[in-house]
Image (tube, rainbow, N blue to C red):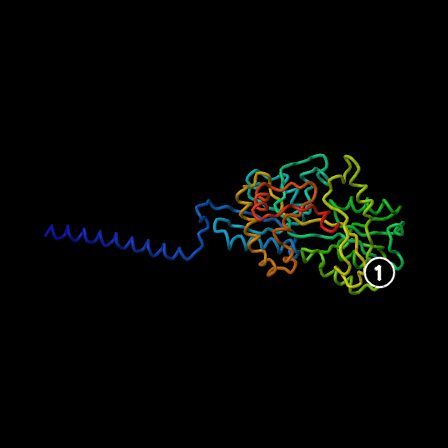
């Protein structure tokens, strides 16, 4: 009897063991249908992508980038984070700890923190490098006052520039003051600038237009820009001085020697049918920056994934059509791409292009 009980106990133990193995197999099968976040033999990499305010093109690109990376790289978990501005992102990264620096990609218009210009004057930081370019922005001057079409004619008038302490404002002010005296510069928000120009209380304003094609022949703006162009019969496409742009840049040790913005012409009709001549605007690129210690192999894989899935950005925003391996390599001053970016460009046979050489 004791032998039978012993055998029965062994059977129970065996059955329990089989049950546990079966449960583990079932659990593994169930988990197998889920993405394995640390797959491909790599440790899970968490990436925060700081963009801009909700609704902007940059904000939408950040969401698209996170979704594309998460869908194609099982070892990355990317999250898009809304922020106040490019300048805010640079200040945040300037004070970030080492861990955050290695796990953050952030939107910027230039690299003021890298060079110690603008609001970073006197505290240069060489820690950031260019990841990749994903857009071109034309800071363009439009006027609503009849017969006032040249910068010299803005003496004593008001011009609307970006609210706050945007890094580009000193550059735009210097361009205008080189041609006109006693100009009043009003730092106001975008919609107020449009309304002020329409009413005549402001002589001109700087609107922002974004390239929708790599050949720079199609540009668009936000709703306020489109509304202004459609409503204002007397809108003038005012040229910025190319000669002064070069003079400002040529001053040795000057504040604009390596500035990221450059005056270039965009083709006639690229912005509006009434634009019958090339329009000289202050052009800058829109880039994702990373810390110099950002993992090189990780950045290479990010750019490779972006290049292989470039068409998917259009599903998120029409301006996503601008993103190609070639346009990702557009650079400003100086051309400080991260080694991971350079490795990707070499792999697809792309040579980095200086912003000012696109249309000259």
Q: Where is residue 127 in the image (x, y as percent from the top left)?
A: 62, 37
Tell me where residue 9 appears, x and y as whole percent: 18, 51
The image shows a total of numbered marks equal to 1
Residue 165 lies left or right of residue 27; in this view the side is right
From the viewer's perspective, tell me whether residue 356 is left or right of residue 76. right
Residue that sits furthest to the front in the current view: 349
Q: Residue at x 72, y 58 (%)?
A: 217
Q: Is mark 1 on a helix, strand or loop?
A: helix
Q: Which residue is drawn at the image coordinates 78% and 44% (left, top)? A: 171
Judging by the rendered image, the residue that carries numbered circle 1 is 199
User: How many neighbours does mark 1 have within 10 angstroms: few (below 14), some (14-19), or many (20 or more)?
Assistant: few
Q: Camera-side residue: 30 or 217?
A: 217
* Residue in the picture at 63% in, 59% down: 317
Res. 258 image quadrant: top right
Q: In this view, does 76 lie above or below 118?
A: below
Question: Residue 143 appears at what percent x and percent y?
Answer: 83, 57
Residue found at x 83% / y 60%: 235
Q: Residue 266: x and y, percent?
A: 76, 55
Nearest the viewer among 118 and 148 is 148
- Viewer-side residue, 266 vs 8: 266
Which of the two residues, 353 or 176, is positioned nearer the viewer here?
A: 353
């Amino acid at each position: 009897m004791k032998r039978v009980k012993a055998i029965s106990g062994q059977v129970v133990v065996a059955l329990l063991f089989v049950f546990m193995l079966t449960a583990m197999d079932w659990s593994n099968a169930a988990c197998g249908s889920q993405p394995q976040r640390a797959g491909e033999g790599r440790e899970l990499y968490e990436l925060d992508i700081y963009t801009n305010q909700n609704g902007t093109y940059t904000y939408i690109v950040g969401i698209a980038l996170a979704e594309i990376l998460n869908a194609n790289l099982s070892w990355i978990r990317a999250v898009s984070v809304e922020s106040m501005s490019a300048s805010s992102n640079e200040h945040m990264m300037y004070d970030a700890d080492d861990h955050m620096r290695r796990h953050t990609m952030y939107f910027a218009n230039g690299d003021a923190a890298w060079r110690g210009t603008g609001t970073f004057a006197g505290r240069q930081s060489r820690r950031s490098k260019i990841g990749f370019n994903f857009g071109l922005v034309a800071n363009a001057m439009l006027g609503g006052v009849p017969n006032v079409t040249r910068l010299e004619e803005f003496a004593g008038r008001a011009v609307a520039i970006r609210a706050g302490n945007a890094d580009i404002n000193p550059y735009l002010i210097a361009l205008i003051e080189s041609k006109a005296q006693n100009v009043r510069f009003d730092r106001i928000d975008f919609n107020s600038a449009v309304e002020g120009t329409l009413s005549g209380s402001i002589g001109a304003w700087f609107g922002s237009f974004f390239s929708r094609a790599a050949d720079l022949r199609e540009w668009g703006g936000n709703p306020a820009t489109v509304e202004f162009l459609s409503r204002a019969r007397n809108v003038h496409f005012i040229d910025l001085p190319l000669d002064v742009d070069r003079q400002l840049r040529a001053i040795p040790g000057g504040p604009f020697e390596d500035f990221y913005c450059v005056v270039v012409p965009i083709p006639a009709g690229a912005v509006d049918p009434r634009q019958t001549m090339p329009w000289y605007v202050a052009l800058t690129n829109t880039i994702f920056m990373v810390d110099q210690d950002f993992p090189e192999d990780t950045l290479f894989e990010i750019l490779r994934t972006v290049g292989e899935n470039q068409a998917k950005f259009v599903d998120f925003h029409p301006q996503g059509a601008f993103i190609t391996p070639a346009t990702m390599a557009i650079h400003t001053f100086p051309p400080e791409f991260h080694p991971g970016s350079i490795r990707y460009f070499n792999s697809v046979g792309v040579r980095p292009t200086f912003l000012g050489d696109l249309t000259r």
